[in-house]
Amino acid sequence: MEKNELPDGANSLAGIRKFLIPCYLIATIVYLAFSLHYFTTGLGGTMLLAVTLVPLAYVLWVLQSFVAGELPYPRLGFKLNIAIACAYIAMCIFSIIYMRVEFDALIYDRAG
């Protein structure tokens, strides 16, 4: 009998999904928390909500594609997809932190 082995990329993707599924769930809970905070208090307004949730939604899309077993860029290979996804997620997290910390200064002091 032959053993039906998975390709290297599929085996690696199955291994990393054990880490990505909890990350996806945590990101979903953070998205829900920001949404509920805004809808219950209204603090910050819609612009602060947008600059927070749009990058977070992109992080969710990237994580969901890996959780679903799909590579965002299948032609590039597994390792390069992981590197690109990490870069995207890092840029989004930096964007969320920077925009929330500097929101008032960007909107009121430096506008125009």
Image (cartoon, helix red, strand yellow):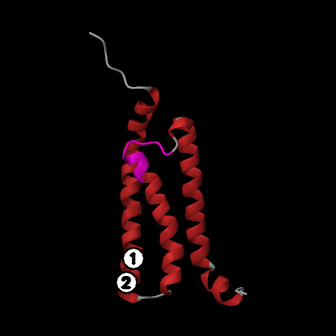
**x and y, in percent, of residue 58 in the image:** 49, 61
**Residue of label 1:** 35
Along the line of sight, which residue is nearer the eye, 29 or 5? 5
Kind of residue at badge 2: Phe
Q: Give, as a three-letter code, the residue at label 1.
A: Ser
Instruction: Give the vertical position of 102 relative to 32 (above or below).
Output: below
In the image, is residue 94 above or below residue 38? Answer: above
Residue 27 in the image: state x and y as whole percent. Answer: 41, 62
The residue at the point 37 percent across, 53 percent down is 22
Q: Say which mark, if any, is on residue 79.
A: none
Q: Are marks 2 and 1 in contact (CB under 8 Å)?
A: yes
Image quarter of the N terminus = top left
Q: What's drawn in magenta, residue-wise?
A: 64-72
**Residue at image coords 37%, 43%:** 18
Residue 7: image quadrant is top left
In this rendering, is residue 23 above or below 36?
above
Magenta span has 70?
Answer: yes
Residue that mark 2 sits on: 39
